[in-house]
Amino acid sequence: MAPASSSEFNWGDALAELGGPSPGMLNIGVACADRHVAAGAGDRVAVRCLGRGRERRDITFRQLSDLSGRAAAVLAELGVRPGDTVAVLLGRVSGLFATALGIWKAGGIYCPLFAAFGPGPIRSRLELGRARVLITSDELYARKVAGARSSLPQLEHVLLLGEDGACAKVHPGCSDFGALMAAAQPAPSVSTRPDDPAFLHFTSGTTGTPKGAVHSHRAALAHLATARKVFGLTEADVFWCTAEPGWVTSTAYGVIAPLVCGATALIDEVDLEPRRWYGILHDENVTAWYTTPTAIRTMMRFGAALARSYRANSLRVAASVGEPLNCEAVLWGEKALGVPFLDTWWQTETGAIVIANAPGDGRRPGSMGRLLPGVEAAVMRCDGSEAKPVESADVVGELAIRAGWPSMFAGYLGDGKDPSPCFRYGWYFTGDLVRRDDDGFFWFVGRVDDMIKCGALQIGPFEVEAVLMDHPAVAEVGVVGKPDLLLREVPVAFAALNPGFDAGDALKTELLSFARQELGSTMAPREILFVAELPKTTTGKIMRRVLKAKAVGEPDGSDALSVQRPCPGRYDDE
Ligand code: AMP
């Protein structure tokens, strides 16, 4: 099967729409706010932020343009020059938007970090990113940064941002960002070109050490195009992306995508609470919703009846990203929400959605969907030093994308002049194993480095997980390879159970024989271990290296890394 692409699509149209004001210039901050003000839409709500008590804070495009101009002026005054990294450690607060846009207008590189990280990961990312400025809250600074400040000599300025501009406490060695912004005159954006660096995200590290991927202003072209194609976003929409700021999904679809489309970006300060989330979907007239499989599976535990009691009449479409969305979750989501529920695939390095079950293209629950326009992709088989696109359908290979799409990362930090080894023969190798069916739908198999090498067989953990997820007792499951003298590795499963099921030997035996029946004895797990919850990254991905360590009884550091809370739900469907 030949590489998939769509030749009629032209990225030049998106550049013509977002570029300016001077020829050859593209700045995400300008494209997100000033452009709409210039077009007469300054009074429309750009951002709606919900506080803890669900109180609303609205920011119009005019206010966002003004505030981000002030932020840019403050940063320039502090000596931030084009290409400097400005780290941001904030939750989902309204100040995040003017901060990000201000960094772009000052020509800086926006580098958001997870507020859930402890001091160690924050310090290492500040060092790796060579951040000269950090923007955070007084509370996060005191808890997570102050202790390490003396070991961060390159960090020249820390700016503290309070909600509504008021900072409760200005710690020694820090400045009040809100006060500085209030005193500043809004600065016009510096002239940035499409390929100038704009944002830096560290990959989630589900299998290894996080790496910093740099993206340019050109990425906004992909955010515009994919937001329209997958979500049908227009100025009339209220778009809710639930991602935390440290995850690339927040930068791409929490901030840039809705704003370049002129829609209202909604954020909620509070983490996942099913009743609250249904209330928000309903009361805020959310039209398009982007979340994660973990979130939808948590909501499943609360039952479809609860979802239906809040049925959000404005909602048109819901979608998820980050990990495989099993067929059951798609069908449940569609029934409970009453709208199409779409899986989308992309990663930090691709910068924007690449594969999706886009409306109008036909959907296939359980698959990641089809390739979006303007991108070329192939399923590659690697033989020694050679890589060839797979010609036939349903053959497993590594997903590769032809280099040069707008939101392609420019490289990893620290790679220097050497191109990253994931770029070969003009393709970017994603590290994900997939198969493509006859109709062009891609199916996730697993990460290359997660494959379980069992005798002559390569077992994709997701295929085993998907079968176990079909059993009513299983709420979540992670499958990894455990070293085996005879077969090299055998699959073992870690399962979290739905409420009402007894984690005893009888259920273990039942699950093992259920898996053997469905998968055959080679692919079926040899052991099942019951856990209260699976270790997850801050973006909800199962940390397989922690499970692998657990499987052989080694210390795994999971206490420091797991941030998911157990869900006290029930599964009362039908
Ligand atoms: P990150 O860069 O942290 O967002 O992680 C990207 C990785 O998440 C991808 O390489 C995949 O392994 C996984 N991923 C993202 N979306 C999906 C999806 N729809 N189905 C399966 N895996 C996914």
Image: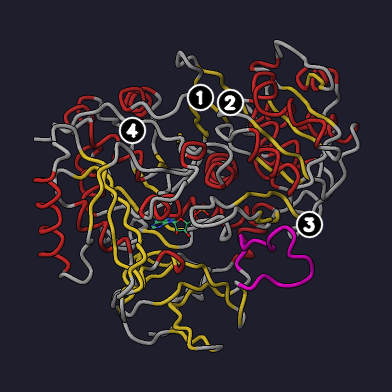
- Answer few, some or many: residues within 10 Å of disc 3's Cα (few below 14, many 20 plus, some between 14 and 19): some
Is 521 on the left-hand or right-hand side of 449? left
In magenta, the rendered stretch is 405-421
**Residue type highlighted by circle 3:** Arg
Mark 3 element type: loop
Q: Is residue 343 above or below residue 333?
A: below
Can residue 558 be seen here? yes
Q: Nearer the viewer, residue 161 or 554?
A: 554
Residue 494 pos. (x, y %): 29, 49
Return the residue at label 2.
93
What residue would you read off at disc 1?
269
Q: CA distance from mark 1 to mark 3?
A: 33 Å
Question: CA separation, marks 4 and 3?
Answer: 38 Å
Q: Are marks 2 and 1 in contact (CB under 8 Å)?
A: yes
Q: Is residue 513 magenta?
A: no
Q: Residue at x 75, y 51 (%)?
A: 20
Q: Secondary structure at mark 4?
A: loop
Choose between 332 and 43: the one closer to the eye. Answer: 332
